[in-house]
Amino acid sequence: MKQWTGSTRSAEERCSPAVTHNCAGRPKLRYRPPVSPSSESLLRSLELPVSALSLPHSRAPQMSAFCLLALLALPTAWAQQLLPGSCNFEHNTCGYSSDPAYARWTINEEGRFITVDTSFMDGQEKAFLLSPELDLVDWSCLRLVYQITGTGSLQVHLRPEDESFDYTLWTASKPSDSWLIGSVDLRNASNSYKILIEGRPSKEAGSSVAIFEIHVVPGYCIECNFEEHHLCGYSNHWNPNVNWYVGGSIARDPRSNLPDDHTLSNEGGHYMYADSVYAKKFQEVAKLSSPMTTTPMEGCLSFYYQRDQARGNIFSVFTKDQLGHYEEIWRPEAYAASTWRLVQVDIKAPHPLEVTFEAAFNSPRGGYVALDDISFSPEFCHTETEPMFDPSTASCDFEDGFCQYYQERAEGSVWNRVSVKPNAYRLGDHTTGSGSFLLANTRFTSRPGYVGRLHGPFMPGNLKYCLRFYYALHGFVKIDNALSVYIYDENNIAQEKIWTVSASAKDIWFEVDITFQKPMPTKVVFVSICKNFWDCGLVALDDITVALGDCRIAAGLQQSLTRQCSFEVDDCGYTQDRESDASDWVRMRGHTPTSYTGPRGDHTTGVGYFMYIEASHMLPGHSARLLSTELRGSTGPQCLVFFYHMHGSGTGLLNVFLRRVDREYDALLWRRRGEHSISWMKGMVEYTCKTRHQILFEAIRGPSIRSDIAIDDIIFKKGPCKNTGAVDNIPYSGFSENLNEVEY
């Protein structure tokens, strides 16, 4: 049985008037859960007209008998293999269980679905549904039919074996009056894992989150042969006149010129097609979109198509990223294809994507376009396709040298690699607080001014890049031309200035991110110009990173890979331990109010948020304790990475504790005492804990109000800590004799 449902569109949006012309009218859409697992009840639960099955249409007016026959025949035509983790909740939960620490998911008594309702939350904010342990070695796709009523959200997390934290794979928050389909890619895994489904209905009366069924199938979520009722989550973009329909069935109209299905090679199979019969305007477009993948894709996309009267239609395939940007990847060279024709096209996307099939028609005589058997392989279709370019070759933190960056010899050594020992006056590097960075200064030249160009390595053209770096300025009277970024071509000619500093506060590392794309090979060049010694100061540069894709997408992917908190959006679930402290940590941005203590900006961007204690609101010896969310524990080592700021003559203590649920006392993991630096310093703690636990940050006020302590950019990583340069991983207090010492 085929239902017209998609990953993000409601049933009503997916059933246009053009679709319903073959069968009976469409009932009003509303939330009505199914009462039995029969084909009839599933159709009613989705509140779709029978015509959503949409047989190949003829011009005959009476087609209800054809539709009914197709409805009964479709489930027996083809059945897809279901993997462990699948469940229709008809009689039980198939090994899925609610986490007892939160609200419970309950099976509805009148129908086969499971729900969490705001009326039965018992004071809780969320409910977790945990799958049985899954051992899926190969790539697979999880599809769930769900509905959010009122307001709320639904998330799917991955819980790997022997790791302390979960990875968020997919989220939805759009309410709907019909069932929707969510698609989640499950990548190859060497170890077993569990799927964690989080439902969060709001406190608004009538809000609920429900799941009708969960299917786990082999392969990629963008693959489909259109033999299943859910159409693999593909969705039609509604158009008043032209749309994609489900074609094929044993009850086809003998007058139709549409083809047999490709999958089964007979009239019993199904495919998708777009027909021009109702086209009224020039180039009316029918769009069929795959679900958005939840992971970057690289490999070979294959599909079969047919075209009739090809001079009257245009058929194209596009990819679309999460920002809505389209890129055409294929269009046919031949005018017509009277038999099923195989297409293979290589995809290299460093980000999640949708695949969109577009058919445009010039008139009602524009014929049809048919589509079937979409598949994907991680291997490229064509041997000449080059692997994805590794952009890390253009990244550098300058801890071990210049990497692949270099200067023009004629200009001398304007850019020099330096390090600053932790002190109360001079800013250290951004990477660790005590490592190396690049500095441009007139003292490095014998001239009253300079032009310093720092060249990066060449990168291939026709790719979208995200360039990120940090810069800091000190002592500038005029910042014009203090630092700019140019794109140079292969002939070493500047093509475009893509960024220049406009305004900046003193002694703060600011983040810059730039998205750019050029058709030819290019390189990034950092340029600092000083025209007059008296107007110029110091220009610092550090932590250059280059990634593929738009910066807005790349940032989201990075945060999904680790348990990371930058406090930019909220407190990430960290809570105040009010039982044993006298004050609170405060989420803050900008300069702390007390002079000569606290950071001037955050570590993440220079203008974002961090957590800190305001010493002027505390008494000496008073503490503030901040607790992480609960971690499950693992048999192997874990690495906690964070940045801390301890600047001020009266700075007290910063402690990191391990709090275990089975122990009465907290275990000290890390401690720092007294003033350390005006810079953000990197801290790393390696620990092992096999049971459920929390990490606790404790700040204790020192003898004076100049005792602000701050933390930022907390990351949990699996495995031992890797020392990447000068990291503050040993106890330290006090300063070198030269508080302003710079090592060149």
Image (cartoon, rainbow, N blue to C red):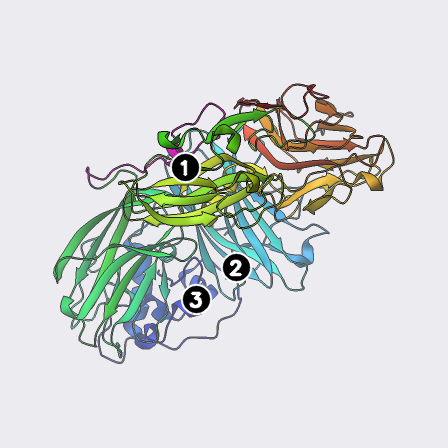
**Which one is earlier in the sequence, the residue at label 2 or at label 3?**
3
Dot placed on the residue nearer the N-terminal end, 2 or 1 = 2
Q: Nearer the viewer, mark 2 or mark 1?
A: 1
Q: Is residue 735 left or right of residue 113?
A: right
Residue sitting at 78 percent across and 34 percent down? 707
Residue indicated by mark 2: 147
Secondary structure mostly seen in magenta is loop
Q: Label 3 amino acid?
A: Ala
Say if the magenta span includes residue 394. Answer: yes
Disc 3, SS: helix
Is residue 460 visible from the viewing direction of this image?
A: yes
**3D distance between C-alphas at marks 1 and 3:** 57 Å
Queried whether the magenta region covers residue 148, the answer comes back as no
Helix, strand or loop at label 2? It is strand
Residue behind mark 3? 11
Identity, as a three-letter code, of the amino acid under mark 1: Arg
Q: Which residue is mark 1?
A: 453
Please state the total of marks drawn on the protein image.
Answer: 3
Q: Residue furthest right?
A: 619
Query: Residue, x 20% and y 51% (percent of image)?
Result: 343
Residue 441 location (% of width, % of height): 52, 33
Quadrant including the N terminus: bottom left
- In this picture, which residue range is highlighted in magenta? 382-404
Residue 167 at x, y percent in the picture: 52, 39
Image height of 474 relative to 118, above or below: above
Q: Amino acid at mark 2?
A: Gln
Binning the other alpha carbons within 10 Å of mark 1 as few (below 14), some (14 to 19) or many (20 upward) gives: many
| Quarter of the rendering containing residue 164 | top right
Of residues 604 and 181, which is closer to you in this image? 604
Along the line of sight, the residue nearer the viewer: 359 or 635: 359
In which quadrant of the rendered view does residue 459 lie? top left
